[in-house]
Amino acid sequence: MKATYRRAGWLAATAAAATMVGCSSMAFMDGATTARREVGFTAEAPPPADPEFNTEEYAHFQDNPFYRVADQPLSTFSIDVDTASYANVRRFINDGHLPPPGAVRLEEMVNYFSYDYAPPADGKPFSAAVEVRPAPWEPKHRLARIGIQGKKVEMTEAPRANLVFLIDVSGSMESADKLPLVKKCLRMLVKQLRVKDTVSIVVYAGSSGLVLPPTTGAAREAMENALDRLSAGGSTNGGEGIELAYKVAQENFVKGGVNRVILCTDGDFNVGVTSEGSLVKLIEEKRKSGVFLSVLGFGTGNYADSRMQQLADKGNGNAAYIDSVKEGRKVLVEQATGTLITIAKDVKIQVEFNPAKVAGYRLIGYENRVMANQDFNDDTKDAGEIGAGHQVTALYEIIPAGDPVPGGIVDTLKYQTPTTASGPASTELCTVKMRYKLPDGETSDRFDIAVNDPGSDAVGTPEFDFAASVAAFGMLLRNSPHKGQANWNLVLELAKGGLGRDKEGYRAEFVDLVEEAKDLQGSK
């Protein structure tokens, strides 16, 4: 289920932002459902935009509920390294409005930030550790933080890259925060490439075309010139563009190398294969080729958030939202190897809770990544990928044994005998199990982590507190029924205590964002 976001005041704010960056509010808001020009043709004047209408799409979902361990002792989900939600939420707040609830995905908010996780030291592609402390918004509960750190790979040591930039040049990409920003960001990525790497550029509007055949890093100027020549106009045949981009990538496939399509769009596909289901099916078929997908979202007014998430998920890739040159640098320069190089795929987590210690639990976020428990051991089931140097953070709120579990009263089952752990395992809170495949593998490996409860007196580390503050921030923005005692002041207290080294200033920016959100809601 998707929600289309309509808000006249928000449109006015974004129109004002457009004026500040040098484009007309009419061009900034253009939904581009009317064809205006194809690549290489003279542009017609854009039709008047409806200032009261906005077609941004966000999936509707409910926060994960609490489960009773007696009924469901297992929790299984696919990891997610996407960060698009945080950047998009930041855009809303900076434009003077709180985001719609569907735009707030807690796991992407938390995973936007880096944490001090130990690197892998045992030959595995990633390490994992678990920290448990009292939940700041509900001190009687515990908060478990699962932290994953992917092995780092320097760009100079990375295998040869075969990249295809798939760029939406339809009319809806005309405004300054879309195609012009795409070109600036991709130029930064081109500067990171080596002589042995190749780049192709495929564009699509009403039709698609190859505007730059596979070109080596030795001809960087040719890449930059091809980007400079791009202009926006026409309707949006995204399906045709995807077909051509994968065809080019497959024809130039580098065995053992990095083979990736990088899709840059607002997601407003309106010609050809347009339905989300059909596009997802197309991407699922294409991923069998071994070509991975990165989805970079741009712009406002018609941003198709739910579609972008689905394409990245099914394309063995990741999704980011680019709202500025600074964000483009973060994704394509600072995290270039993570964006481009996959070190593990189909990564799944399953947590088994000990009924002797845990009455109930809930997974915070990952609502669209929850899997059936039997899928954990099924190597045919698709799951998330981890890029080089990427981190993944997952949080569980845990209710200790003996405390009530929200969600209503359930009668004791007549024909079931509750089981409890015995022996050394009886002191364990839970066991975290992980499965993954290597990028070119078809059979998964597994390892387990036993987790103990340090008790209600344990003090959170600054890193733990900061992750908790971001989660609490997301719960406030969503008005989550599970936010407990969370409020803006608690979020700020946790965030300021967790600023740490903050070399790039992202955590300090978060504190400012919370202050802005607090003011927007008029909360004390």
Image (cartoon, rainbow, N blue to C red):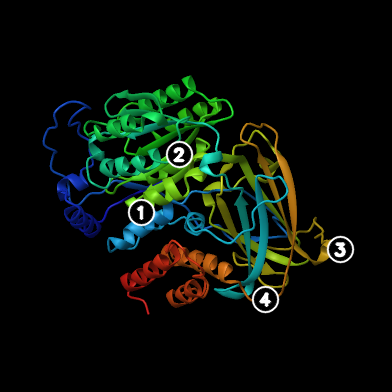
Pointers 2 and 4 in contact (CB under 8 A)? Answer: no
Measured in 3D between alpha carbons, the distance from the residue under mark 4 to the one under mark 3, in whole angstroms, is 22 Å
* Residue linked to disc 1: 326
The x, y position of residue 179, in whole percent, is 27, 40
**Residue type, numbered disc 4:** Ala
Measured in 3D between alpha carbons, the distance from the residue under mark 2 to the one under mark 3, in whole angstroms, is 45 Å
The x, y position of residue 294, in whole percent, is 45, 39
Measured in 3D between alpha carbons, the distance from the residue under mark 2 to the one under mark 1, in whole angstroms, is 18 Å
Q: Earlier in the sequence, mark 2 or mark 1?
A: 2
Q: Earlier in the sequence, mark 4 or mark 1?
A: 1
User: What is the number of the mark on residue 424?
Assistant: 3
Q: Secondary structure at mark 1?
A: helix
The answer to whether residue 83 shows anywhere in this view is yes
Q: Residues within 10 Å of mark 2 (few under 14, many from 20)?
A: many
Residue 224 falls left or right of residue 463: left
Q: For marks 3 and 1, give the one nearer the viewer.
A: 1
Q: Secondary structure at mark 3?
A: helix
Residue 374's place in the image compared with 237, above or below, is: below
**Residue type, numbered disc 3:** Pro
Q: Earlier in the sequence, mark 4 or mark 3?
A: 3
* Residue linked to disc 4: 458
Q: Secondary structure at mark 2?
A: strand
Measured in 3D between alpha carbons, the distance from the residue under mark 4 to the one under mark 1, in whole angstroms, is 38 Å
On-image quarter of the C terminus: bottom left
Q: For marks 4 and 3, give the one nearer the viewer.
A: 4
Q: Earlier in the sequence, mark 2 or mark 3?
A: 2
Q: Residues within 10 Å of mark 1 (few under 14, many from 20)?
A: few
